[in-house]
Amino acid sequence: MDIIEISEDNLDDFLSLLGEDLIEDLKRVYYSGIGAVDGDGNAKGAFVYELLNSESEEDIKSRIFLVKSGDQETLKGLESYYRQNSVSEDETVESTYELLDEADAKALSETGFSMEKKEDEAISITLKELAATGLGKSAKLPDHIGSIEDLSILQFRDTIKQILFKGHRGNLEDIPYLPKNWFDNSISACINSGEKIPGLFLIRKTPSGILIPALLFAYGPEFKKDLLYMIRFSLLKALQLYPPETIVRIERKSASTKALTDKLMPNCSGEEIFYGTRKEQA
């Protein structure tokens, strides 16, 4: 068995283990993958993580998204490579994992990670279910709310810079590097106020067809109303373009997002997952 780094040159070899969505994520700047291959070069294990705080002065942390291994030897080989190479090179001070599989979580706990259960911060809901909430009520939207389709790339990049300058980066560590076409331009919304674009609601459509709200921010005297207008615009547009069974995955990382989902979707909760942390180098 050999342990290798997953790169764009060998991504396709790991498709069966990672799935098409994670394969695309591994092309992003802060995502990395480690793979295990057998003597014939066939993929038999994978370990995927994202670096956090790379765009800030805070300590570098790592979030492990996926561990797939058919046996303990493979998992230990992947974890050992991660600890001896990735942690050192990236100057990571803490690693965390969030996994559905109890066996993989237990295996990581044997390498120094803690292990506990918690509710996943992400919840999944269909467009049909969202349409049944208060957001799905038909209402006339103001003319200054529309999709980002008509924004030039320059306008889009400048708007992202303005939002980052105000201290907001949504759910994405690497949003300064993501191109406009990484988001679904048809259902992502913006506030068009003359020369300024004082608000964005960016939504990613993954290769498998899942919709993921990635950034929601507005500023100005009417920003609270405009936030709801953008959400409603995007929902109504998505209902026109996609089947009602389309899954929307919402990351409830901020207090405001959790408060909104609790209000609109009080009976919607995340899956039970396994969670753990490990201190790395000081």
Image: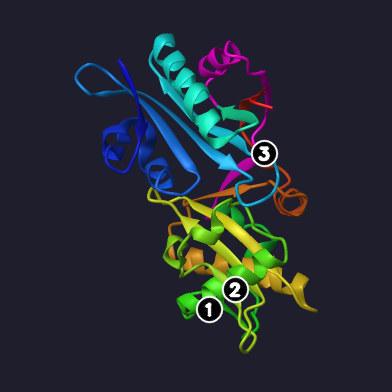
Q: Answer with left or right where residue 263 lies relative to residue 206.
A: right
Point out residue 32 in the picture as x, y percentages from the top left corner: 45, 38
Tell me the residue at 63%/18% (across/down). 113
Badge 2 amino acid = Thr
* Residue occupied by mark 3: 269
Please tell me the numbered disc located at residue 199: none
Q: Relative to the observer, which residue lies in front, 280 or 151?
A: 280
Which range of residues does the magenta coloring cover? Answer: 100-127
Q: Answer with left or right where residue 247 lies relative to residue 164.
A: left
Tell me the residue at 51%/74% (across/down). 148
Point out residue 252 in the picture as x, y percentages from the top left corner: 68, 46
The Cα–Cα distance between marks 1 and 2, rounded to whole angstroms, is: 6 Å
Vertical relation: 113 (above or below) 18:
above
Vertical relation: 200 (above or below) 196:
above
Badge 1 amino acid = Gln
Question: In the structure shown, which secondary structural element does the residue marked by tag 2 occupy?
Answer: helix
Q: Residues within 10 Å of mark 1 (few under 14, many from 20)?
A: some
Q: Answer with left or right where residue 159 lies relative to residue 219.
A: left
Q: Relative to the observer, which residue lies in front, 14 or 264?
A: 14
Vertical relation: 266 (above or below) 65:
below
* Residue occupied by mark 2: 159
Q: Which of pointers 2 and 3 lies earlier in the amino acid sequence?
A: 2
Q: How is the image coloured?
A: rainbow
Look at the numbered discs 1 and 2 and tell me whether their residues touch, using CB distance below 8 Å: yes
Q: Relative to the observer, which residue lies in front, 266 or 10?
A: 10
Q: Residues within 10 Å of mark 3 (few under 14, many from 20)?
A: some
Membership of 110 in magenta stretch: yes
Residue occupying the far left of the picture? 40
Question: In the structure shown, which secondary structural element does the residue marked by tag 3 occupy?
Answer: loop
Q: Residues within 10 Å of mark 2 (few under 14, many from 20)?
A: some
Question: In the structure shown, which secondary structural element does the residue marked by tag 1 occupy?
Answer: helix
Residue occupying the far bottom of the picture? 194
